[in-house]
Image: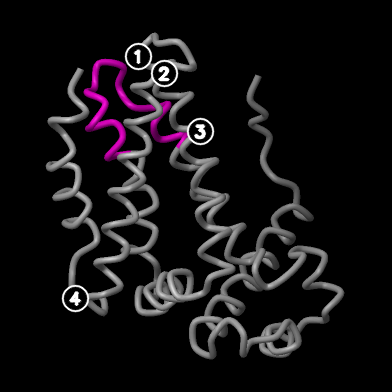
């Protein structure tokens, strides 16, 4: 049974502090570079202590990775909630669009674009991102198999979700290469239009 109780005041405060720290950290990492930014820089800019920072994040790397974890959970929820009769390509496009829309609709898309570039150019972050995406893919494949009434180890959900995340990666990379001139939503739509024949069942 889903717990629908409203968050307590302490839980809301903790969430706000976590989001504030993350926003400051991402801005600094994007502006100064990953190697050049220290935890001390982040806590100074946020007006908090190192102890407070480490209560929420183990490292500056974890700030970015936690953001990815949240997006993965949201994509899974979106896929699970799509209409049962919706074609897989459409359902997966809507799921992936959760992450795309986060980037496009962020209150400061310029900084979000800088974070995307940061991930792509920092080997440690790129490796952790790929690791995190493998979890997204496994979760999405599980949901897709359930939607289609297929065994968990069926090849189709595995391949379909891998292709969907490849489309997401391609859209993000082209968005970054365009310096934000390209529309990430349009890039995603185009990528899925190309994938659609391969995803038909």
Q: CA distance from mark 1 to mark 4?
A: 37 Å
Q: Nearer the viewer, residue 107 or 26?
A: 26
Q: CA distance from mark 2 to mark 1?
A: 5 Å
First reached walking from the N terminus: tag 2 or tag 4: 2
Residue 32's spot in the image, x, y percent? 54, 90
Provide the secondary structure element on which disc 2 rests.
helix
The picture quadrant where one finds residue 195 is top left
Q: Residues within 10 Å of mark 1 (few under 14, many from 20)?
A: some
Q: Are marks 2 and 1 in contact (CB under 8 Å)?
A: yes
The picture quadrant where one finds residue 47 is bottom right
Of tags 4 and 3, the one toward the viewer is 3
- In the figure, is residue 46 to the left or right of 73? right
Question: What label sits on residue 148 in the rendered view?
Answer: 1
Residue 64's spot in the image, x, y percent? 58, 65
Screen quadrant of the N terminus? top right
Q: Which residues are magenta?
A: 76-94
Q: Residues within 10 Å of mark 2 (few under 14, many from 20)?
A: some
First reached walking from the N terminus: tag 1 or tag 3: 3
Q: Mark 4 highlights which residue?
A: 181
Question: What label sits on residue 138 in the rendered view?
Answer: 3
Of tags 1 and 3, the one toward the viewer is 3
- In the figure, is residue 193 to the left or right of 188? left
């Amino acid at each position: 049974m889903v717990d629908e109780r409203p968050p307590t005041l302490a839980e809301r405060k903790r969430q706000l502090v976590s989001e504030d720290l993350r926003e400051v950290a991402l801005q600094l990492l994007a502006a100064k570079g990953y190697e050049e930014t220290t935890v001390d820089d982040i806590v100074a800019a946020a007006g908090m202590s190192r102890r407070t920072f480490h209560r929420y994040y183990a490292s500056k790397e974890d700030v970015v990775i936690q953001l990815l974890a949240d997006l993965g959970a949201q994509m899974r929820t979106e896929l699970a909630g799509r209409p049962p009769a919706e074609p897989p390509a459409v359902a997966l496009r809507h799921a992936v669009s959760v992450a795309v829309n986060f980037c496009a609709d962020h209150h400061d898309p310029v900084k979000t674009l800088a974070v995307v570039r940061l991930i792509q150019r920092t080997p440690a972050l790129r490796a952790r991102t790929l690791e995190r995406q493998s979890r997204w893919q496994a979760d999405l494949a599980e949901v897709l198999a359930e939607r289609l009434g297929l065994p968990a180890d069926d090849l189709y959900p595995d391949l379909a979700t891998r292709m969907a995340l490849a489309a997401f990666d391609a859209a993000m990379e082209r968005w970054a290469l365009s310096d934000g001139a390209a529309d990430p939503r349009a890039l995603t739509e185009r990528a899925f239009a190309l994938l659609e024949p391969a995803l038909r069942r």
